[in-house]
Image (cartoon, rainbow, N blue to C red):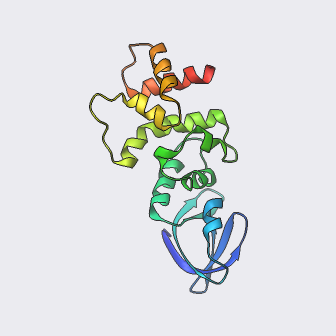
């Protein structure tokens, strides 16, 4: 597995670079944000990598820091997100700061898919941030607010769903359905 490369940038394109590492050229896909931060051609670059192996292709995805790679690895496991979209989303910042509006800016992700991604991420946000929620705090409410919904809209939607729903994940799913209709 290739997990880290350091070498000279010999070519830059819109979606990838060629990196010369001791005479071996690697094609490394990078996000638009990462590409905009790169040094000039013939300069040395260090990238963390993820090797995606599929039936008909092997592609190398590069990240400028370890945290971005970890975020990518979480996103890549979500159904409906391919590695290129996961790479672009990972470049936007920490998962707890990513909301529906940011996701919709990624090519191939519309409102419906953005809401599905947010729903799947909700259970993972706690693990990624490593923070525990304070006692008495409604995790569903906090999760939805962190995803970009206004607290007032979230409280209103939570009051509209069945009181039999107990888990934060189920509450979030129902609220997203409710908000999607309105």
Up/down of 119 relative to 21, above or below: above
Q: Residue furthest left?
A: 135
What residue is at 39 percent from the left and 28 percent from the top?
168
Q: Residue furthest right?
A: 14
Up/down of 60 relative to 175, above or below: below
Q: Looking at the figure, which quarter contains the C terminus?
A: top right
Q: Which residue is at the front of the view, 18 or 141?
A: 141
Q: Which residue is at the front of the view, 13 or 141?
A: 141
Q: Is 107 on the left-hand or right-hand side of 6?
A: right
Q: Residue furthest bottom?
A: 23
Does the image show residue 144?
Answer: yes
Up/down of 33 relative to 124, above or below: below
Q: Quadrant of residue 11?
A: bottom right
What is the number of callouts on the image?
A: 0
Residue 22 percent coordinates (x, y): 56, 86
Up/down of 10 relative to 165, above or below: below
Does the image show residue 31?
Answer: no
Q: Which residue is at the front of the view, 3 or 166?
A: 166
Q: Quadrant of residue 134?
A: top left
Residue 28 percent coordinates (x, y): 62, 68
Residue 48 percent coordinates (x, y): 50, 68
Residue 46 percent coordinates (x, y): 52, 75
What residue is at 53 percent from the left and 50 percent from the top?
76
What residue is at 62 percent from the left and 20 percent from the top?
181
Q: Which residue is at the front of the view, 21 or 177?
A: 177
């Amino acid at each position: 597995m290739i997990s880290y490369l350091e070498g000279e940038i010999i070519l830059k394109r819109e979606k990838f670079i060629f990196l010369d590492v001791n005479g071996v050229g690697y094609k490394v896909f990078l996000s638009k944000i990462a590409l905009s931060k790169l040094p000039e051609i013939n300069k040395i670059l260090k990238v963390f990598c993820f090797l995606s192996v599929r039936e008909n292709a092997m592609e190398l995805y590069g990240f400028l820091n370890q945290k971005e790679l970890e975020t990518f690895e979480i996103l890549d496991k979500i159904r409906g997100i391919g590695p290129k979209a996961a790479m672009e989303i990972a470049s936007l910042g920490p998962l707890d700061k990513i909301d529906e509006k940011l996701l919709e800016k990624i090519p191939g992700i519309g409102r419906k898919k953005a809401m599905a991604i947010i729903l799947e991420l909700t259970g993972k946000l706690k693990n990624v941030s490593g923070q525990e929620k304070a006692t008495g705090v409604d995790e569903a409410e906090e999760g939805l607010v962190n995803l970009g919904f206004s607290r007032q809209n979230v409280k209103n939607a939570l009051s509209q769903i069945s009181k039999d729903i107990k888990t934060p994940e189920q509450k979030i799913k129902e609220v997203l359905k409710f908000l999607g209709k309105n």
